[in-house]
């Protein structure tokens, strides 16, 4: 039976509608959640992501501000901007769009953001809190992946989840969050031997490799939930995932499309984090 297509756009729209109501209520209490995005340089993809974030904020009523700096901005200047934002009570979330120009250390910039305003969830304190299971701002893409799986109605507890990819921003946190949802988790990466042996046993398969179409139906257990995080632009200019959509949809029970799957969830989780950060900073 063909898989149900998990339309991230639709799930994201329903979460955004809930957030818009919540923001409306907060405004009545005198609290307008605010997000500041800092963008350094002129990478077209980064500009497009930032526009998406600005649009998302407007949709749910979050006040947003974009600070644009040219590629020659120094690390010290950028740290100075972040320190001012850390002190600004109207700014509840700070996001520095990555990647940064090579002369700026991403680690130094992430660590400059106050953890209470770390809406990307990349600060070592946020990551540490996530690892030990404390309440914290979760990284947006992994959080979006978990929300999508939950919306299928699939019980995660007790399932075998296989995550392909172990990056700090996707693979590792996805695996950790699945484990916290009581899945039994296997992590695979580029040095994994006989990948198919692992993936064929997965009830939930999350693919985050950045390798277009590397997962075919031979990798997938019939009835598995398959989440394709990959976003790859191929020669024709088309955006494709890491999963061969047409053939995997023949065997999976649920499958995310690319685009329109995980992507819309990422921005939505950023909006959610901004609201959570605003409430926490206001003591609500
Ligand atoms: P990275 O390049 O940082 O990590 C890729 C991971 O995949 C690595 O752990 C690597 O293993 C593993 N890998 C690569 N090739 C193979 C292979 N042949 N077999 C098994 N594992 C492999 O990428 P990211 O985690 O940052 O992103 C992954 C994808 O997700 C990209 O396409 C990216 O564009 C997309 N993405 C999408 C987002 C969204 O909002 N939709 C947000 C963030 C990312 P090793 O560690 O051994 O090198």
Image (tube, rainbow, N blue to C red):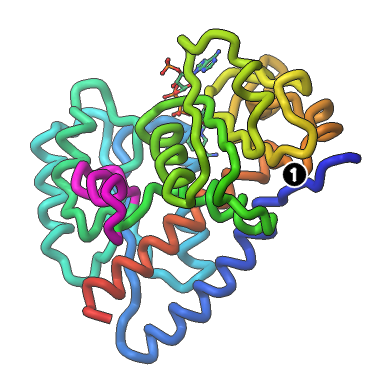
In front of the other: 96 or 197: 197
142 vs 115, left or right, is: right
State the residue lying farthest toward the bottom.
28
Q: Residues within 10 Å of mark 1 (few under 14, many from 20)?
A: many
| Mark 1, residue position | 254
> How many numbered marks appear?
1
* Residues shaded magenta: 120-135
Q: Report x, y in % for residue 47.
A: 44, 40
24 vs 136, left or right, is: right
Instruction: Say whether residue 264 is magenta.
Output: no
Say if 206 sits above or below 261 in the image.
Answer: above
Image quadrant containing the N terminus: top right
Residue at image x 27%, y 44%? 127
In front of the other: 22 or 215: 215
State the residue lying farthest toward the right.
1
- Determine whether the residue tagged by mark 1 lies in a helix, strand or loop: strand
Residue at image x 58%, y 30%? 207
Say if 281 sits above or below 249 in the image.
Answer: below
Where on the picture, by quarter, is residue 16? bottom right
Residue at image x 72%, y 38%? 224
Q: Report x, y in % for residue 216.
A: 74, 20
Where on the picture, by quarter, is residue 74? top left
Instruction: Say whether residue 126 is magenta.
Output: yes
Q: Is residue 68 visible?
A: no
- The verdict on label 1 being within 8 Å of ligand 1 is no
Q: Report x, y in % for residue 107.
A: 20, 33
Q: Report x, y in % for residue 263.
A: 57, 44
Q: Is residue 124 visible?
A: yes
Residue at image x 51%, y 57%? 268
Image quadrant containing the C terminus: bottom left
Where on the picture, by quarter, is residue 198? top right
């Amino acid at each position: 039976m063909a898989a149900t297509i998990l339309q991230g756009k639709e799930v994201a729209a329903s979460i955004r509608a809930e957030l818009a109501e919540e923001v409306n209520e907060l405004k009545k209490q005198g609290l307008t959640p605010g997000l500041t995005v800092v963008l350094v340089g002129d990478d077209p993809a980064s500009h497009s992501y930032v526009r998406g974030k600005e649009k998302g904020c407007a949709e749910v009523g979050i006040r947003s501000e974009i600070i644009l700096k040219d590629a020659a901005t120094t690390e010290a200047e950028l740290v100075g901007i972040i320190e001012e934002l850390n002190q600004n009570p109207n700014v509840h979330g700070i996001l520095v769009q990555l990647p940064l120009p090579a002369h700026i250390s991403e680690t130094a910039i992430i660590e400059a953001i106050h953890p209470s305003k770390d809406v990307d969830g990349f600060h070592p304190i946020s990551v540490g809190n996530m690892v030990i299971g404390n309440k914290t701002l979760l990284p947006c893409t992994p959080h979006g992946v978990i929300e999508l799986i939950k919306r299928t109605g699939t019980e995660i507890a007790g399932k075998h989840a296989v995550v392909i990819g172990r990056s700090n921003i996707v693979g590792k946190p996805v695996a950790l969050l699945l484990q916290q949802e009581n899945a039994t988790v296997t992590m695979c990466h580029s040095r994994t031997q006989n990948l198919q042996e692992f993936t064929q046993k997965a009830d939930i398969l999350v693919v985050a490799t950045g390798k277009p179409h590397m997962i075919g139906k031979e990798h997938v257990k019939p009835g598995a939930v398959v989440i394709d995080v990959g976003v790859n632009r191929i020669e024709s200019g088309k955006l494709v995932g890491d999963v061969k959509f047409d053939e995997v949809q023949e065997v999976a029970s649920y499958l995310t499309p690319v685009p329109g799957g995980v992507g819309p969830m990422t921005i939505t989780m950023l909006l959610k984090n901004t609201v959570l950060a605003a409430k926490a900073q206001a003591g609500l």
